[in-house]
Structure formats: structure tokens, C-alpha cells
Amino acid sequence: MSTVRELIAATFSGEAYPLAPWYAALLEASPPLRGFSATNAPKIRKKARQARTPDEQRDLRCELAVAAALMDRRSPLSYEPLAAPGRRGPDFLLRYKGHTTVYVEVSRMRPPRSEEPDHAGRVAALLCGKLGQLVAGAANLLVIVSDAGPHPNEDIGAIPLFRASGAVPQATTTPSSLFAASPVPVPLPNSCHVSAPCCS
């Protein structure tokens, strides 16, 4: 397997890239992430090259942080499994313990512009905008990363989709906890928080 330095060179074209030190620390701590990065180095490098602004780099950072949180030797993770020209698809395909397929989409919610934002309305709008990327007939996990901090369950529960279905969005940190009853936090960079993953 490639060394951490080799992986940073392959994914970010060297240690000068803003995300390189942070990602190197994740690679040091996770052999599965090193394997994932070696397999997907061209995709990560392309995204890093396209992420020119700090805001775009933060999007990539949150996406890679979720990938790191899902790493498990027993649950293979594929990057952009349905990528095709002109088609928007989920970010990841997780094969939970090798037999249960879950498509994972990561979306970052920017800080609200108003002092009294409509949290439920913003999450609902984001969910509606992501419907086209979900895979019909399969389990889908939408991870909403919020710069403004976690949203109260009361706000998320106010969305008609969740009221009608009785679904309770939960934060998760490992493949096993995707199917757990109790929410647990995902370790994400700085002030990022997972606000409302959900299955559909």
C-alpha cells in the first residue's frame, strides 16, 4: 500500500494544498481510508483541482470527512459509483458488511443569511433539491453538514416529509451505527456538524 506522503501527492499534488495536512492525519489513523484514497486518487485529485476557493475546499473537506467516518474493512465504500457525463449521482456507495447497499449523498448547508432563519424550510429545500440524486428502489442516506451547528430535532421534525413518514433523522459515525436506534455524532472538521442524515 502507498505511504501517506505518496497518497497526499497522488490526491492533492503535494503537501502545499490547504487540505493536505488535515487529510494526512486522517490517513495516518485509518488503513481503510488509505486503501480508499489509493483507489480513488484520480477522482479526489480532480475535485481538489476544481476546488479553488476556501468555500469549495470546505465542501470537499466535509465530503472526505464523511468518507473517513464510514470507513470499515467489512463495509466497502465506492466513490461516485454512478458518475456519468451530464448525470448527478450520489457521492458514495456503501456495501454494509458486504451485503446491504446504501447510497450516500453529502451536502453542506451554508450559514443562514438572516438573523432568524427558517431552519425547517432550509432543510426541506435542500432535501427537495437532492431528490434527483437519490437512487430509486434502494436505500439512500443524505448527510447534511451544517456550518451553523446541529439543527434541533424539533426543527427537522417540523418538515412535512418526516411528519408524514414518522422517520427520525439521525447522525451516524460508523457503518454499524447507520442502522442503530440512537444518534451519535460524526467527527467533522472544525465547526461542521452532521445535521440530518436520513434513509429513504
Image (spheres, rainbow, N blue to C red):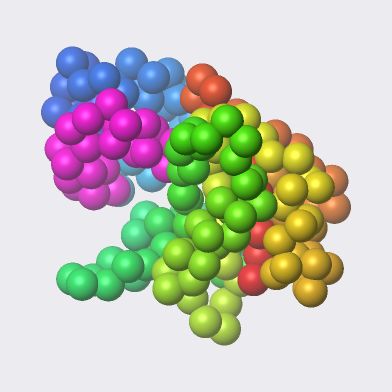
16 or 156, nearer to the observer: 156
Image quarter (top left, top right, bottom left or bottom right) of the C terminus: bottom right
Which corner quadrant of the image does residue 117 belong to?
Answer: top right
Q: Main secondary structure of the magenta part?
A: helix
**Outermost front residue:** 115
Q: Is residue 122 above or below residue 25?
A: below
The N terminus, quarter of image: top left
Q: Horizontal placement of 157 versus 114: left or right?
A: right
Q: Using residue 40 as the reference point, say whether residue 180 is left or right of it.
A: right
Q: Give the range drawn in magenta.
A: 40-65
Q: Is residue 146 above or below residue 83?
A: above
Say if residue 17 shows up in the picture.
Answer: yes
The x, y position of residue 14, in whole percent, is: 16, 22
Q: Which residue is drawn at 49% across and 71% down?
A: 131
Q: Residue 5's spot in the image, x, y percent?
A: 25, 20
Q: Is residue 5 visible?
A: no
Q: Which residue is drawn at 69% across and 39% down?
A: 151
